[in-house]
Image: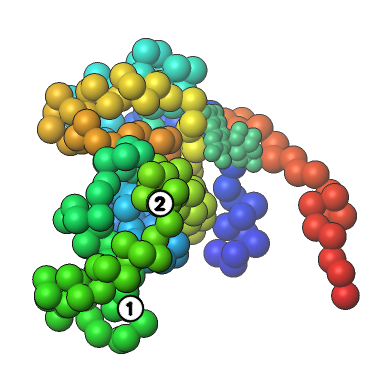
Amino acid sequence: MTLREIMKFRHTVKKYDPERKIKDEDFHEVLEFIRWAPHSMNFQLVRNIVVDRESKLNKKIANQEAMYSNHLVAKDASKLQFYIVPKNGSIKFDDPIFKEGIKYSAFQKTGRDVSDISENDIEEVLPMFKESFSKNLINMMQEWATRQAYIQLGYATIGASHKGIDTTSMEGINPDVLKEIFISEGLMTENEVVVFSLAYGYRFDDKSFNKSQRKPLNWFTHEVK
Ligand SMILES: Cc1cc2nc3c(=O)[nH]c(=O)nc-3n(C[C@H](O)[C@H](O)[C@H](O)COP(=O)(O)O)c2cc1C
């Protein structure tokens, strides 16, 4: 499919075929595509949980309490992906997750592979990060990471369409209920937040989505030449 065809294929699907299952190899290709999305400073603080329709966990999640009006999509889609970011105030400069972020951030421009970066290397640049990282940013990791999660969402919808897989972006979820479920399953910690979900599967029929409509280009973009 050309990029134009991929974009024409993509719609927010409202009803999934409950019989069709995404092949692991196709889904892993989509995951790889998402994993290579760009990140501010390459810190990579966003992770995700994928719940298969056939799993026991899906039964705990695919209900109105956790998924509001998206519960039927959650029940029938082949997979549900939940994007997780660190809670504000949960990351301190000396935490392993911050140092891991530094590892990917600071050394990329040197061309050194992350696997060659030692704890000492990180300690050497840590003071510079402490100084340059604004106080605001360290206190707003949740918002910062959430912005990166939305970039991944864009990648995910396009990556899935490329494999002929449909998606539904879902902000209409109950993050507190989901968090409780994921913590009880050992999949998430108190220090994290669920920001949105993405359903993957195959449209039930040609009427399983609304016709996409957008504001005109001349409203959307003001080109100055
Ligand atoms: C961040 C985000 C959150 C969304 N949340 C929901 C949702 O909870 N439920 C839903 O049915 N659609 C949701 N949508 C889908 C939008 O309503 C949809 O993208 C928009 O109406 C345009 O339709 P189209 O994607 O089919 O072109 C969401 C979309 C985005 C980008």
Mark 1 surroundings: few (<14), some (14-19) or many (≥20) residues within 10 A: some
In the rendering, at what x and y percent does residue 55 appear? Answer: 20, 30
Q: Which numbered circle lies on residue 158?
A: none
Secondary structure found at label 1: helix
Picture quadrant of residue 26:
bottom left
Q: Residue type at mark 1? A: Gln
Query: Which residue appears at 33% of the width and 58% of the height?
Result: 44
Quarter containing the N terminus: bottom right
Query: Which residue appears at 49% of the width and 25% of the height?
Result: 172
In the image, is residue 11 above or below residue 127?
above
| Figure label count | 2
In the image, is residue 144 above or below residue 171?
below
Find the residue positioned furthest to the bottom. Answer: 111
Q: Which comes before the other along the chain, label 2 or label 1?
A: 1
Depth order, front residue of 29/216: 216
Q: Residue type at mark 2? A: Lys
In the image, is residue 47 above or below residue 207?
below
Give how far apart the Cα atoms at labels 2 and 1 are: 23 Å
Locate residue 97 relative to residue 78 in the image: left or right: left
Mark 2 surroundings: few (<14), some (14-19) or many (≥20) residues within 10 A: few
Locate residue 177 relative to residue 17 in the image: left or right: left
Find the residue positioned furthest to the top. Answer: 65
Query: Which residue appears at 33% of the width and 66% of the height?
Result: 129
Locate residue 190 relative to residue 48 in the image: left or right: left
Q: Name the residue tied to disc 1.
A: 108
- The quadrant of the picture showing ligand 1 is top right
In the rendering, at what x and y percent does residue 166 appear? Answer: 48, 43
Residue 178 visible to an observer of this rendering: yes
Picture quadrant of residue 21:
top left
Q: Name the residue tied to disc 2.
A: 135
In the rendering, at what x and y percent does residue 92 appear? Answer: 25, 49
